[in-house]
Amino acid sequence: MSNENSSIHEFDFNLICEYFSNLGRQAPGSPETTIQALNFIRHLTTESRIADIGCGTGSPTMVLADHVPGHITGIDLFPKFIDIFNSNAQKLNIQDRVKGIVGSMENLPFQDEELDLIWSEGAIYNIGFKRGLNEWHKFLKPGGYISVSEASWFTEERPSEIDEFWKDAYPEIDTISNKIAQMQKAGYVPIAVFALPENCWIENFYNPQITVQKNFLINHEGNNTAEQLIVNQRHEAQLYYKYKDFYGYVFYIGKKF
Ligand code: SAH
C-alpha cells in the first residue's frame, strides 16, 4: 500500500471512529441478549479471566461485569473507544477488575489456556468467524467458553440484492447450521445458539444513529468521505428493514473440548 493510500485509509478510520464513538453501542445487541447468552455459561468465579474482543466502547462488557465475577479485559483496535471504555468502567467503579486495552484480535496478548471465557459481540467478522474461533481456541482453559455474535443467514435462499450486499461486505456470512458445524470443527462443543431479536437492530442500533448522522453531517459539511459514510450507513439500515427475515446476528456459545 502506498503512503498516500494509507493516509487516506487512516482518515477514513478517524471518521468511522468518530461516528461510532458517538453511539452507545457499535453493533446490534442488547443487555437482555448479553444476559441470555451468559446464562449458558457456568462456573465463573472471582478468579475467572474473561476477554471481550472487539469491545468497542464497552456497552456489552459493562453488562457482563454486572453479572459475572472475575477480571475482564476489553480489547479494541481504536484507542478512542478504549478511552471511553475505561471511563465507563471508572464511572461504574469497576476499574479494578474491568480494563480496556488497545490491541488487535489478530495478535492477542494472552497466554495459552489463560482464559475462562472469550466474549465478542458483533466483532469476530473483522478476523473472520472461522479464523477467530480457531486462533482464539488456544487461549481458553480446557472447558472454557466462547460466546460470539455473528451475522448469519436465516434461510437457505434469499433475494439477490441482499445476497450480493453481504457477499461484498462479509463473504463469510453463512447459514446458522454451517456456522455451528464450523464451531464444532474448531474444537468447541456447541452449547447454545439463538438469533438476536429485531429490537437489537432497530431500537438499539439504527434508531440512535438518526440524530448522530444529522450532527455528523453538520460537523463535516462538504466532506465527501463523511457524506459517503452516512449514505452507506443509511443504505445498510434500509436493507435491514427490507430483508430482516433473511438475516441477522446470531449468538453462538461453545465450550472448549
Ligand atoms: N462489541 C462492541 C463493538 C462491536 S463493533 C459492541 O457490541 O458494541 C466491532 C469492534 O471491533 C469495533 O469497536 C472495532 O474497532 C473493533 N475491531 C475491528 N478490527 C479489530 C481488530 N483487528 N482487533 C480488535 N478490534 C477490532
Image (cartoon, rainbow, N blue to C red):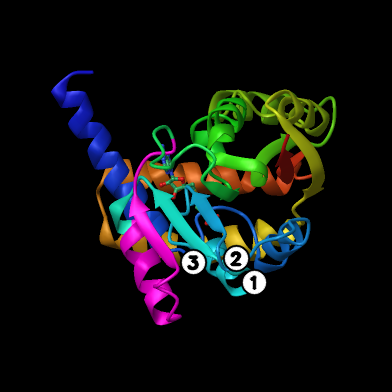
The local crowd at label 3, few if under 14, some if 14 to 19, many if 20 or more residues have their Cα within 10 Å, is some
How far apart, in angstroms, are the residues tagged by discs 3 and 2? 16 Å
How far apart, in angstroms, are the residues tagged by discs 1 and 2? 5 Å
Q: Residue at x 56, y 26 (%)?
A: 131
How far apart, in angstroms, are the residues tagged by discs 3 and 1? 19 Å
Amino acid found under the numbered disc labelled 1: His
Question: Tag 2, which secondary structure?
Answer: helix
Instruction: Between residue 71 and residue 107, name the one nearer to us.
Output: 71
Amino acid found under the numbered disc labelled 2: Leu
Q: Residue at x 78, y 26 (%)?
A: 181
Side of 252 relative to 45 (left or right) = right
Q: Which mark is residue 64?
A: 2
Q: Are marks 1 and 2 in contact (CB under 8 Å)?
A: yes
Q: Are marks 3 and 2 in contact (CB under 8 Å)?
A: no
| Residues shaded magenta | 81-105
Q: Is residue 205 above or below residue 114?
A: below
- Residue 185: in magenta span: no
Residue beneath label 1, please? 67
Q: Position of residue 138 (x, y in %)?
A: 55, 33
Q: Is residue 99 above or below residue 185?
A: below
Question: Tag 1, which secondary structure?
Answer: helix
The local crowd at label 1, few if under 14, some if 14 to 19, many if 20 or more residues have their Cα within 10 Å, is few
Mark 3 residue CB less than 8 A from any atom of ligand 1: no
Give the position of the C terminus as an image quadrant: top right
Q: Position of residue 25 (x, y in %)?
A: 51, 61
Side of 104 relative to 177 (left or right) = left
Q: Are marks 3 and 1 in contact (CB under 8 Å)?
A: no
Residue beneath label 3, please? 24
